[in-house]
Image (spheres, rainbow, N blue to C red):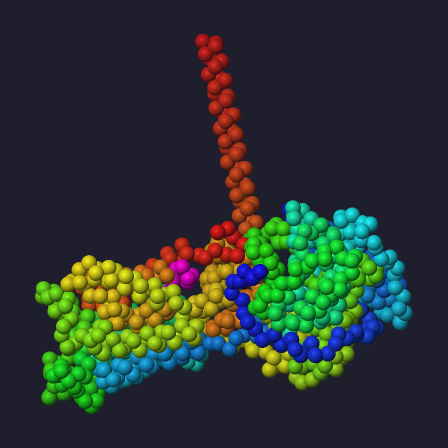
Amino acid sequence: MPWAQEALERPCTLVALDKIRFILWGRAQHDGQLTSMSPQFPTAAAPHVIAPNSVRRVMGLVLCTLVPAIVMHVIFFGAGILVQLLLGIATALAAEAFALRLRHRPLGAFLSDGSAIITGVLIAMCLPPLAPWWLIASGSAFAILLAKHLYGGIGMNPFNPAMVGYAVLLVSFPVQLTQWLPPPLADLQILRPSFSDSLYTIFMGHLPAHLTWDAITSPTPLNSLRTSLAMGHTMQEAQSGPLFGVLGGRGWEWINLALLIGGIWLLALRIIRWHIPVAMLAAMAIPAAILHVLDPGSYAGPLFHLTSGASMLGAFFIATDPVSAATSNRGKLIYGAGIGAITFVIRTWGGYPDGVAFAVLLMNAAVPLIDRYTIPRIYGHAR
Amino acid sequence: MTAPAMHGGLRLAGNKKRSTQSALRIAAAPSQVVLPLDQHAGTAATPLVQVGERVLRGQPIAQPQGEISAWLHASIAGHVSAIELRPTPHRQQPAPCIVIDSDGSEESAAHEPVDVDRLDAVALCEHIAAGGMVGLGGAVFPTAPKLLLGRQADEVHLILNGAECEPWISCDDMLMRERAADILRGASILCRALSAARCSLVIEDDKPEAILAMQAAQSAAHPNIHVPNIDVRVVPTIYPAGGENQLVTTVTGLEVPSGGLPSDIGAICHNVGTAAAVARWIDHGEPLIRRIVTVTGSGVAEASNIEVVLGTSIADVIAQCGGYSGRVARLLMGGSMMGRALASDALPVVKASNCLVVALPTDLQPRGTEMPCIRCGNCSEACPAMLLPQQLHWFARAQDLPALDLHGLLDCIECGCCDHVCPSQIPLTQQFRDAKPALTAHRSAQAAATLARTRFEARDARLARLESERQAKLAERRKSVG
């Protein structure tokens, strides 16, 4: 066998052919036979059949699978989300167009790939429905311009742009981000702003005269839990209020279930793989379950964690963003588990009610390291 | 026994029915043949004939150079009209060719049939080499050197490749249907040449007729056949199940070591077409001067499999299949996944020409606008070599050779699966093909550097040792003097 490889590699075996080629080439040129032939048929590199798939299709399907959750959002928190979505998409597209123009990239192909729309939609889904217009606008613009295009645009961003945008808003404008509406439940005794009031609030940045924030908002279940526990209440007492439902927060549990359905749909479409969501949800649920069993008075149970806040959105729609996630299946498991664990830690002991955004960004930063140590075994290499 | 699952792969539209509806046809003898000297893997052959010389059909006209090379025979009787560079379907650059103009005679060079049982195995391998045998699956690796490589293994398992996983190609399917006995005979000769312990035949499950034909031929086998029990393995139709490494793993459960050959783990793969050609050479004295070509695609009037004399022009072959019908979008040699797009049909049929696809736009799904990679991972899921094409793409763009090496660029088999599933429509295979030479050069440069460093360190150590010995001697002498 060594002789065969040597023969294949030895440059001198090529000499004979080259010599013939050289001699004959001169003659052929002399005869004028090899003057530029115009091709009879168009050529291209193999493979010649490509599956009908595109980035646009992938992004479009992700948007479709978000629809059930958006519907739930409208049912429980009013039509404000629709305005936020439109604002988010419009700003993201405008920012994308601006960045593409600056970078001399073709507008058509990149604007229509759907990635900017997804960024705008994901930020909108994280914001309170009555948040002022400049909040979503600045968040989306920051996400697209700084988190995406400063790194080279689609495919090049190390951090999830939507989460960068959201995290910036979360640290910069904490008050506006807590002004959530409660779900429309009779026993809550809270005024429900009309759609025109919502529009007025979003665009004017303050409530119409007949409403006050105290009258219409309530903390999110995660926030309320946190405040209650800080006041020395037990978990049972903290979860006994009208904000809490069967699994998690009322309304929130339905949105999370709709996101779970959307996520399963994405899995079925093979747009995402199971590794990241399963690892993330497991890493969140398992420590929650252990602590809940040990000390049910101080720690919320796993189902509450899974159906509250951005758990499902994060697991299926944010952490699975392939650009900023780990590459190999093993890497994806580590990456997802890291996000789940960090989210749980922030929720339980940290300074923020939810921690998905920070967890995602921290694990984004760890991706190059994870990728370096989780290269899968290649065919023909030792285990 | 269930075959171990191949990693990745694709279920593709086979498009094979188009060319398997009619029986195998025999093409008319051409008036001229163009025979490239390098139509096999390895070193080109050197001509044995002069321009103007008369040659007989089957007469050797070029001899192998070096270990990995093959004989070339005149495929028609006539006069050598030129030895010159001609464009060929298998190379980018024009290649040296021997051109023979037919004189209309059917005169053949005399090659006596050989009694296999009288030859020892090595002599049999040498005789197979004299027939100009190369792998007819498309890779055209010379058969005899492969047999000799296989003989170095302790126990050889001969694997006959009838998987034919590429879309459109059906020449092996038709051969198995119509000439199953030839394949079995060839298999027995190859087994004898290899002293093989076992023999398996792999067929994909989309070829039920071929499976039946092979099984029937086996039960009616001649007692002369050395290996009566060829284990016919039916495997799922997943491209690229017929890739050499994939085939070996399917049959033996072992992986071909990276950078190695199947013979390293005691396996030798030969295409069924090669087996049939070997049988024809041994039993009838006909060297490799013709092959079955699948002529198919929506752009040819009568798609079929046709046995063609090597060197016949592709235009001639297509004309014999009813000519072009419609505006041809691409002319492929090979299938739609790994085939080469030919710029012209004024090219000869070579030993590697298993298939000609005359594709109309409806047969193709061309690449759209290339978008940046979004690392979706479809490619790594489809990769039969278990690579991460999305990472290789990144490192190839950055020309990061150490990272390419670490991520196994040289283990890429260029099957095209990653390209096929890429939503960003990135020409990954092309990129990897282009990056390989640089990595190979980098590796040998590194090997040279390592060697130089080892030498340098050895020299340093030697000098240090000599110096310390000298000092020791000196000290001893001083002591004795003192």
The image quadrant of residue A216 is bottom left
Give residue A365's position: percent from left, percent from top: 33, 61
Q: Is residue B181 left or right of residue A103?
A: right
Frontmost residue, A227 versus B57: A227
| Span colored in magenta | A324-332
Q: Which residue, as the protein is rendered here, is positioned at the far front?
A: B219
Is-magenta flag for residue A149? no
Report if residue A329 lies within the magenta region.
Answer: yes
Q: Is residue B292 visible?
A: no
Question: Where residue A75 sits in the image (x, y, percent)?
Answer: 25, 84
Residue at the (23%, 82%) spot, across then down: A76
Residue at x-position 55% and y-position 49%: B445
Whether residue A254 sits left or right of residue B362 in the image: it is left
Q: Nearer the viewer, residue B294 or A184?
A: A184
Q: Residue at x 90, y 69 (%)?
A: B105
* Residue A48 occupies quadrant: bottom right
**Is residue B451 placed above or below B363 in the rendered structure?**
above
- Front-most of residues B198 and B85: B198
The N terminus of chain B: image quadrant: bottom right
How many badges with numbers are in the image? 0
Residue B402 x/y as whole percent: 48, 53
Where does residue B468 sit, x and y in percent of width and height? 48, 24
Which residue shows up at 68% across the image and 51% down it? B197
**Quarter residue A220 falls in:** bottom left
B168 is higher (above) or lower (below) than B259: below
Q: Is residue A381 visible?
A: yes
B227 left or right of B427 in image: right
- Quarter of the image with the C terminus of chain B is top left
User: Is A66 situated left or right of B135 in this image?
Assistant: left
Instruction: Tell me if residue B108 comes above or below residue B21 in the rendering.
Output: above
